[in-house]
Image: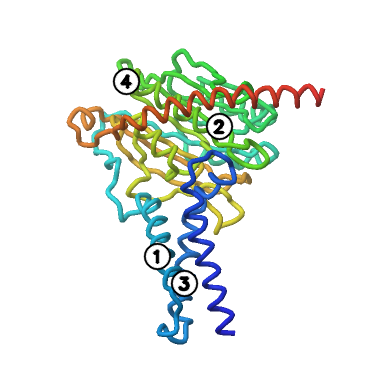
Amino acid sequence: MLEYLMSASQYLAAFIVFVTVWGLLPFDHWWIRAVDFPRIQFIVLGVVAWLGMLLLTGSWAVWTAWQWLLLVALSIAIAFQLRMVLPYTVLWKKEVRKASMSAEAPQLKIMVSNVLTPNNNTAALLQRIQDKQPDILITLETDQKWQRALASIETDYPYTVKVPLENLYGMHLYSKFELVDPEVKYLIVDDIPSIHTQLRLDNETLIWLYCLHPMPPSPTEADKSTTRDAELLLVGQHIKENQQTAILAGDLNDVAWSKTTRMFQRISGLLDPRIGRQFINTFHVNYPFLRWALDHIFHSPSFTLVAIERLESIGSDHFPVLTTLQYEPEVCVEQIQAAPKATAEDKVETKETIEEGVDEGRRVSEEHAQQQRGVK
């Protein structure tokens, strides 16, 4: 039995080393990019394998060179995985400072909820809205059924953008703040929308809000992460080039610690309020061990954080997230919290990714059009 457990630990160690190296490959195929997601799980399994190798061996004196090499490689793999996720714990320096107690600073409470189109538990979302009273509600995967259910909140949310779709990419925006020149854009793929709007915080303050839900790399969606990466980087580049004070929110179908999301932060100059605090793992609701953060909010350095929390399930495969930001432009002016900076390499890679994403988006759009024609 002991020998069996020792062998199992070694096989598990080899697996963790393999997926760690696999994730470093410079390709966008879903079967490579998929290993970006379960880094927390890889750490847990890696530690189990590491302890198993150390504690279950009879005598280290009889270890082969291969076993020692495997232990060293596993240790490096665990350290690498830890480096990727530790910024999203209290062990790291906070990227966004805690909001001041200023009574005059405007606050913005934003709820993001991927409802899961087939989910019929509309009452649960309405209850969360009633309980939390967000200023901004962004819903994803919302169709006509969800639009009808949410009509009851429109007396409290007079400003709306509605994009009901049956393809799992419907999107709705409800706001208590005035929306200025809102637009629905299809940036990369013809049937996947995003919402771009200015938001009037008060008589003198306009900020930008971007709501995104790009395609995930998966065997049932996109073969590659190229369109997802391009959409995120395209918006990030636009924010930076136009020097916008902005908030970007939505289900990005990517994790915060991925190469693309970290590069997006540098390209856009937006901050992540989870850094130095907690993961806020939102998906999958039904599998506690297999959860990671897919629903995000990023913002300009002009905002500080009041609170961020994951809400109770509404019957979707995603938990809703509620984030309260406070507008304090003085912290940006005084460089109290500085924006991430893009390198020359980031800019070149962003340009290449966007170009590849546009080409891939045309191909995917044509595939979707052919499938739609086939359905009709």
For numbered disc 4, what is the local secondary structure? Answer: loop
Observer-side mark, 2 or 1, equals 1
Question: Mark 4 and mark 3 in contact (Cβ < 8 Å)?
Answer: no
Mark 2 or 3 closer to N-term? Answer: 3
Q: Among all residues in the image, which is located at the extreme left?
A: 334
Distance CA(mark 2)–CA(mark 1):
35 Å
Left or right of 287: which side holds 17? left
Question: Which mark is drawn over residue 369?
Answer: none
Observer-side mark, 1 or 4, equals 1
Residue 38 position within the rendered picture, expressed as x and y whole percent measured from the top left = 51, 53
**Residue linked to disc 4:** 243
**Residue linked to disc 2:** 214
**Residue linked to disc 1:** 75
Residue at (46%, 32%) from the top-left corner?
249
Mark 3 or 4 closer to N-term? Answer: 3
Question: Mark 1 and mark 2 in contact (Cβ < 8 Å)?
Answer: no
Mark 3 or 1 closer to N-term? Answer: 3
Question: Which mark is drawn over residue 66?
Answer: 3
Mark 2 or 1 closer to N-term? Answer: 1
Observer-side mark, 3 or 4, equals 3
Left or right of 145: which side holds 45? left
Amino acid type, residue under disc 1 in the picture: Ser
Observer-side mark, 3 or 1, equals 3
Mark 4 or 2 closer to N-term? Answer: 2
Residue 77 in view of the camera: yes
